[in-house]
């Protein structure tokens, strides 16, 4: 049996399990597992998952606030804290974001413990 990591594939838009044309659940493997975990963490508001209330992103710290109410590094800090919930992430290399109205679009790149780079993009409101 291989020791490669794998998990069920989650649709990035609907957050539903992905099924192939025959109705079989698809999987993601290798570093894509960590990339998916980071993306799902960024899509979840902290406290949204009742079994692990600390899981997710502390969007309550930044959403619904005026830009002048936030410190310069507050949004990237919240994003980095969420990304580091994935144990394979060694370093967050870049956090970029745009706020438009009530929507926050985030793009993150990071380095995993195996040296590989992952990227994740999400939009939340």
Image (cartoon, helix red, strand yellow):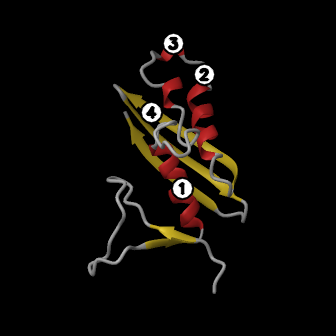
**Residue corresponding to mark 4:** 98
Disc 2 is placed on an element classified as loop
- Labels 1 and 2 touching (C-beta < 8 A): no
Q: Give the quarter of the image for residue 18.
A: bottom left
- The residues tagged by marks 4 and 1 sit, at their Cα atoms, a distance apart of 22 Å
- The residues tagged by marks 3 and 4 sit, at their Cα atoms, a distance apart of 15 Å
- The residues tagged by marks 4 and 2 sit, at their Cα atoms, a distance apart of 13 Å
**Residue corresponding to mark 1:** 37
Q: Which quadrant is home to the C terminus?
A: top left
Number of residues whose C-alpha sits closer than 10 Å to that of mark 1, classed few (under 14), some (14–19) or many (20 or more):
many
Residue lying at 45% horizontally and 15% vertically, measured from the top left? 66
Q: Give the quarter of the image for residue 25.
A: bottom left
Q: Which residue, as the protein is rendered here, is positioned at the far front?
A: 51
Where residue 16 appears, x then y in whole percent?
Answer: 34, 58
Residue lying at 36% horizontally and 63% vertically, measured from the top left? 17
Q: Which quadrant is home to the N terminus?
A: bottom right
- Labels 4 and 2 touching (C-beta < 8 A): no
Residue lying at 58% horizontally and 60% vertically, measured from the top left? 34
In the rendered structure, which disc, 4 or 2, sits on the residue that comes first in sequence?
A: 2
Q: Nearer the viewer, mark 1 or mark 2?
A: 1
In the rendered structure, which disc, 1 or 3, sits on the residue that comes first in sequence?
A: 1
Q: Which residue, as the protein is rendered here, is positioned at the far left?
A: 21
**Residue corresponding to mark 2:** 72
- The residues tagged by marks 1 and 2 sit, at their Cα atoms, a distance apart of 27 Å
- Labels 3 and 2 touching (C-beta < 8 A): no
Number of residues whose C-alpha sits closer than 10 Å to that of mark 4, classed few (under 14), some (14–19) or many (20 or more):
few
In the rendered structure, which disc, 4 or 1, sits on the residue that comes first in sequence?
A: 1
- The residues tagged by marks 1 and 3 sit, at their Cα atoms, a distance apart of 31 Å
- The residues tagged by marks 3 and 2 sit, at their Cα atoms, a distance apart of 9 Å
**Residue corresponding to mark 3:** 68
């Amino acid at each position: 049996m291989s020791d490669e990591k794998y998990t069920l594939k989650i649709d990035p838009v609907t957050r539903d399990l992905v099924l192939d044309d025959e109705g079989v659940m698809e999987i993601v493997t290798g570093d894509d597992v960590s990339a998916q975990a980071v993306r799902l963490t960024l899509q979840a508001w902290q406290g949204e998952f009742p079994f692990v209330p600390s899981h997710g992103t502390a969007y309550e710290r930044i959403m619904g606030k005026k830009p002048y109410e936030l410190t310069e590094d507050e949004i990237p800090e919240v994003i980095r804290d969420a990304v580091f919930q994935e144990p394979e992430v060694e370093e967050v290399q870049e956090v970029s974001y745009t706020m438009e109205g009530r929507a926050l679009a985030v793009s993150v790149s990071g380095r995993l413990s195996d040296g590989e780079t992952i990227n994740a993009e999400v939009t939340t409101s």
